[in-house]
Amino acid sequence: MSDKRAQVYAAIDTPDKGRAADMAEQLSGRVDGLKIGMEFFYAHNSVGYAMLAQSGLPIFLDLKLHDIPNTVAQAVRALAPLEPTLLNVHAGGGAAMMQAAADAAGDANDNGLRAPTMLAVTILTSLAEADLHDMGISGTPRDQVLRLAALARANGMGGVVCSAHEIDALRAEMGSDFKLIVPGIRPSGSAAHDQKRVMSPEAAQAAGADILVIGRAISAADDMAASADAIKASLQHSLAEAD
Ligand code: C5P
């Protein structure tokens, strides 16, 4: 059981620059960070990024880099001037690729930049056991997630993005310093949409999540700021209750 409030990062899941700017403005000071993914970044590049960074919120740049070590390291160096708080790669790129990415991130400090915490994506939650078997990977997705998380930790990654249902096992295996970033979060009573396995913010926090990535539960609300406030209040409340 964790004794600190899980952070809430709102997912900017839109290629629409005006809508993204509106979200950042409404959520500034309300959430702990913003998550920017491929759909926004590829459409608006570093200019769009800078616009959202003006909110003053920490940013998780979710680009899931995956290539040979040299290319990924150069990509991390190219992104470093943006100073994202979190940046990720695919663990499937292997040990050398993750270490090269971690080393490149560390170089940012030498260049007077704030280095990102590097995260690994283990197994995409869209892949089931049968999909892994089709790719020649035996065992369950959970086994593979644990194996890749251990490889990630041994090669400079500060944490992983994981499904809520993997938090328990990862926390037990990886210890308390390894960051667990968790999407697929739904406040009790809200729609699951296309997510198959969801968990409430309070349950994910209790299991040991560090950061909850929340999309539609905030972005589809009539009042985004009020929704974010309510989620944070419920997280704080459930911590107090657990004391
Ligand atoms: O709207 P919702 O809360 O489901 O959005 C979740 C966010 O987390 C989206 O940005 C989605 O792409 C991302 N994500 C996910 N599952 C993963 C990894 C990322 O839902 N395994």
Image (cartoon, rainbow, N blue to C red):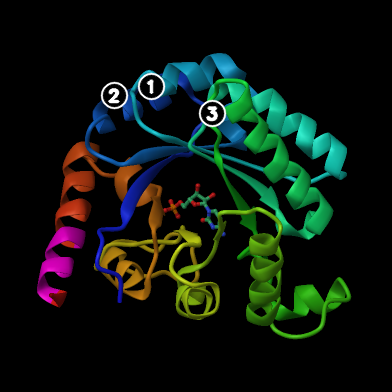
The C terminus: image quadrant:
bottom left
Residue at the spot 25% in from the left edge and 58% down from the top edge: 5
Residue at the spot 48% in from the left edge and 37% down from the top edge: 85
Could you tell which of marks 3 and 1 lies nearer the N-terminus?
3
Q: Of 155 and 126, which appears nearest the observer?
A: 155
Residue occupied by mark 3: 15
Q: Amino acid at mark 3?
A: Pro
Label 1 to label 2: alpha-carbon separation: 6 Å
Q: Amino acid at mark 2?
A: Glu
Residue occupied by mark 2: 25
Q: Of 215 and 209, which appears nearest the observer?
A: 209
Using the image, determine if residue 185 lies above or below residue 18.
below
**Label annotation for residue 48:** none
Q: Which of label 3 and label 1 is nearer to you?
A: 1
Pointer 3 with pointer 1, Cβ within 8 A: no
**Label annotation for residue 21:** 1
The N terminus: image quadrant:
bottom left
| Dot 2 alpha-carbon crowd within 10 angstroms: few under 14, some 14 to 19, many 20 or more | some
Name the side, left or right, on which 236 lies relative to 146: left
Name the side, left or right, on which 130 lies relative to 24: right
Give x and y (percent) for residue 222: 22, 40
Label 3 to label 2: alpha-carbon separation: 16 Å
Residue at the spot 65% in from the left edge and 72% down from the top edge: 145
Q: Quadrant of residue 162?
A: bottom right
Give x and y (percent) for residue 213: 42, 51
Label 3 to label 1: alpha-carbon separation: 11 Å
Can residue 46 be seen? Answer: yes
Magenta segment: 235-241
Pointer 1 with pointer 2, Cβ within 8 A: yes
